[in-house]
Image: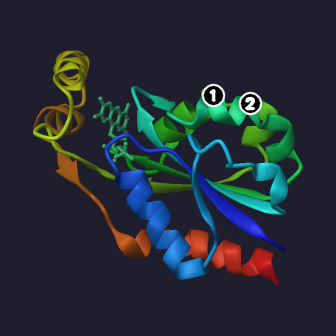
Amino acid sequence: MNGAIFFTSKYGRTAQYAGWIRDATGLPIFDVKDPHADPAEYDFLVLGSPVYFYKLLIRKWIMKNQATIENRPTILFTVSGASSGPKLDDWVAGSMPGALMSKVEHVALRGRQSPREVTWWHRLLLKIAAMRNKDPAARREELEGFDYMDRSSIDPVVELVREWRT
Ligand SMILES: Cc1cc2nc3c(=O)[nH]c(=O)nc-3n(C[C@H](O)[C@H](O)[C@H](O)COP(=O)(O)O)c2cc1C
């Protein structure tokens, strides 16, 4: 079976994970903005998306390609500040149709955020989100940033790709 990686990224962390997965698996990699990125050409898919304001950035692309994704084994790796758990599961479920949600294998990876890197608009929105956040640890991360990038966390994705290829 032939697979490919399709990702989107704003500040490069999801792109970094997608590149690590490409290096470990040899799968071709496409930014979803690339007009030649056609998931219908592949037997299985690895989709990568960051979470922004409790939603997947890739959600419109997923809706556009819903029929193709439904018919193929699909891994969705998310990149977020939040770790895996019910909160992240809810955000992912809220970003795609239920039928798809039950089909994709979700792997939660954690990213990086630095207040110095983001746009002034994002910095402002993060400050507002922090003011409303009741979780002190999450509030601190929104204001001060974090770095959870971990190359070895792609291992479950690489394992599944190896299974699907054979
Ligand atoms: C403006 C903004 C909003 C974010 N919203 C969330 C969020 O709702 N939940 C979360 O867990 N992480 C959130 N993050 C953290 C990002 O998911 C994390 O920084 C990720 O690494 C970004 O990936 P990218 O560099 O590929 O765009 C947010 C980051 C920014 C800058």
Numbered tag placed on residue 23 in the rendering: none
User: What's the amino acid at mark 2?
Assistant: Lys
Residue with the most extreme front position: 36
Q: Quadrant of the C terminus?
A: bottom right
- Residue neighbourhood size for the residue with mark 1, other residues' Cα within 10 Å, grouped as few (<14), some (14–19), many (≥20): few
Which residue is more in the foreground, 97 or 135?
Answer: 97
Q: Marks 1 and 2, how far apart in space?
A: 6 Å
Numbered tag placed on residue 60 in the rendering: 1
Vertical order, 14 against 52 (above or below): below
Q: Residue at x 74, y 67 (%)?
A: 3
Which residue is more in the foreground, 31 or 120?
Answer: 31
Q: Residue at x 77, y 43 (%)?
A: 102
Q: Residue at x 39, y 26 (%)?
A: 53
In the image, is 25 to the left or to the right of 1?
A: left
| Location of residue 62 in the rendering, given as x and y in whole percent from the top left corner | 69, 36
Task: Answer yes or no: disc 2 within 8 Å of ligand 1.
Answer: no
Residue of label 2 = 64
Is disc 1 in contact with disc 2, using a CB cutoff of under 8 Å? yes
Vertical order, 68 against 123 (above or below): below
The part of the image, by quadrant, that contains residue 51 is top left
Q: Quadrant of the N terminus?
A: bottom right
The local secondary structure at tag 1 comes to helix
Vertical order, 60 against 87 (above or below): above
The local secondary structure at tag 2 comes to helix
In the image, is 40 to the left or to the right of 150?
A: right
- Residue neighbourhood size for the residue with mark 2, other residues' Cα within 10 Å, grouped as few (<14), some (14–19), many (≥20): few
Image quarter where ligand 1 lies: top left
User: What's the amino acid at mark 1?
Assistant: Lys
* Colour convention of the picture: rainbow
| Location of residue 129 in the rendering, given as x and y in whole percent from the top left corner | 25, 20
